[in-house]
Amino acid sequence: MEIILTGSIAYDYLMKFPGYFKDHILPEHLESISLSFLVDDMVRQHGGVGANIAYTLALLGAHPRLVSTAGQDFPEYQHKLEKVGVNTSGVHIIEEKFTASFFVNTDKSNAQIASFYTGAMADSADVSLLNLGLTAQDLVVISPTDPRAMARYIDECQQMGVPYLFDPGQQIVRLDKDTLCKGALGAHALFVNEYEFELLQKHSCLDKDALMTGPRFTVVTLGSKGAAIYADGQRTHIPIVEGLTVAEPTGVGDAFRAGFLRGYMEGFGWELCGQMGAMAAAISIGYNGPQKHSFTPAEFVQQFRQHFDDHGQLDAIL
């Protein structure tokens, strides 16, 4: 089984303002607002849903193929992904644009002012899956990117008979009703968080039962309550890993998906797949950034066995 990831590639620019935005805002003059904030610190981090999942999957010994778009500033990021084992041959470089970027400035009260530049991500709908030689033994992950691209990949996977995991995320509100219904009902698997699960019901033609029984399996992440896996007519609850440091939650859901998928590639049971997702998420949340964590498969297994009993099955990824 080859995992093909079609989600976004992005840079996150994180800034810290040593004061309070509210002290600089005059409510009675909002129509002529003109502000500039001198920041003490800025870091640029690698992000994007597709790239985040690919990164952690590669740490776990897989070699996922990333199919997406990036800009002229991608080479350094590309080198990092390839170094850990991600296949970036499916990334199309849009030379006249920069990679999608998220700019956020956070003040002392954790208030934020942010902007998102779509950049090369806006061209992802021009990239096709049809010429990649995919088969029914592969799995395409359709994660948040340009909504037109997501709709295209749903159509192409169904046309080719290639199973796909539908992970609509924050694009639920931008995908039309027909695309959401077609994407969820035709999916091999559905991944959403608790809020997105409710939002998907609101914006699609599907109720809770349809979303839990239509795909081969459905995974709903529940934050501090863990995750629920609906498959084979049963619900399997996966608890979070307790007692680890919490630094920053960005990308934790992506790490969960990667851990789960690594287990799924090996044919593990639902509980073990979910536990691998929980462990990957717990490691990721201990770092400031969705791709700051690093481990070998052996180190992952060692940490895993401090919290769960895999009965020796994880030897398969060593």
Image (spheres, helix red, strand yellow):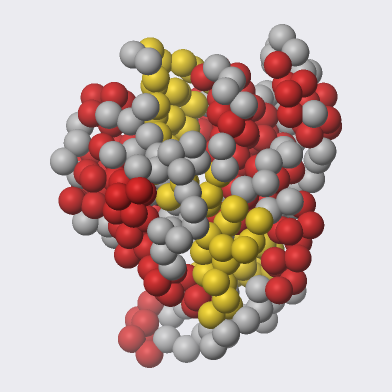
76 over 50 or under it: above or below: below
Foreground: 14 or 314? 314
262 over 32 or under it: above or below: above
| Residue at image location 43% in from the left, 67% down from the top | 127
Image check: 90 left or right of 161? right
| Residue at image location 34% in from the left, 13% down from the top | 233
Locate residue 256: give its quadrant: top right
Residue 115 locus on image (x, y percent) = 49, 73
Image check: 159 left or right of 278? left
Can residue 23 be seen? no
| Residue at image location 41% in from the left, 64% down from the top | 128
Q: Residue furthest top?
A: 311
Q: Quadrant of the C terminus?
A: top right
Can residue 129 be seen? yes
70 over 286 or under it: above or below: below
| Residue at image location 75% in from the left, 65% down from the top | 79
Image check: 275 left or right of 313? left
Q: Quadrant of the N terminus?
A: top right
Residue 123 locus on image (x, y percent) = 43, 74
Residue 182 locus on image (x, y percent) = 23, 45
Foreground: 22 or 256? 256
308 over 130 or under it: above or below: above
What is the tally of numbered marks visible in this picture?
A: 0
Residue 96 locus on image (x, y percent) = 54, 88
Image check: 158 left or right of 139? left
Locate residue 87: give its quadrant: bottom right
